[in-house]
Image: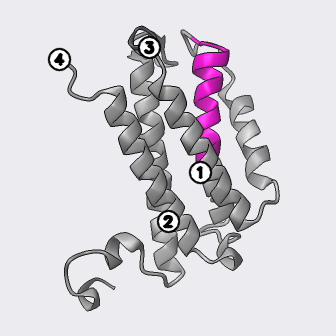
Amino acid sequence: MSLYSVRHLTDSFRTVRRNTIQVAEEIPEADYQYRPAPASRSVRETLVHIAWLAGADRFMHEEKRLASFDGFDFGAFLATSEVEETRERSKAEIIELLRTEGDRWAQWVEQLPETFLSEPVRLPNGKSVSRFEMLLGTKEHEMQHRAQLTVIQRLLGLVPHFTRNLPISRDKVA
């Protein structure tokens, strides 16, 4: 019996991505260059990094079909994300990138066979996890970055939609 299926993963990923897009829409484009600390990603870079993660999964699990990360050059791999993150894009382009890459990721995952998803992948620490667990990690990684963006919304003086939509008095949480 499977308690968390591919369908659960893709449905919850779509919810996470919808919420990420809502955050991206609510932050004014003028604030997309904002960094909470000098060495951190800007809003723009964080959103592009989130969109880039979907393609990273396809690269690792489909194109390369890595069975082990032993010897995998994560530094060089992440450098491709950094190149994309620093490329100039408008707010509208970034939001569209989040939409299209999110849809592409969910549709790709939905068609993956269970045999593929259950394949073990050896991590650099020697531990093995299934491809399914790694794909679940993509959703969790996005949630981590969205939490950062939620803090940034607060730093910019914005009230995040999760707070605005709480069924309690707004003046108690704003």
Per the image, the residue denoted by label 3 is 113
Name the quadrant of the C terminus.
Answer: bottom left
Q: Residues within 10 Å of mark 3 (few under 14, many from 20)?
A: few
Q: Are marks 1 and 4 in contact (CB under 8 Å)?
A: no
Q: Earlier in the sequence, mark 2 or mark 1?
A: 2
Q: Earlier in the sequence, mark 1 or mark 4?
A: 4
Per the image, the residue denoted by label 4 is 1
Which percent across, then down, holds residue 59?
A: 65, 24
The residue depicted at 20 percent of the width and 77 percent of the height is 167
Per the image, the residue denoted by label 1 is 99
Give the magenta-colored segment's residue range: 50-66
Depth check: 124 or 105 in front? Answer: 105
Per the image, the residue denoted by label 2 is 22
* Residue type (three-letter) at the residue carrying disc 3: Pro
- Numbered disc 4: secondary structure: loop
Task: Note whether residue 155 is visible.
Answer: yes
Q: Quadrant of residue 92?
A: bottom right
Q: Earlier in the sequence, mark 3 or mark 2?
A: 2
Q: Label 3, label 4: how many angstroms apart (C-alpha)?
A: 16 Å
Is the residue 93 above or below the residue 110 in the image? below
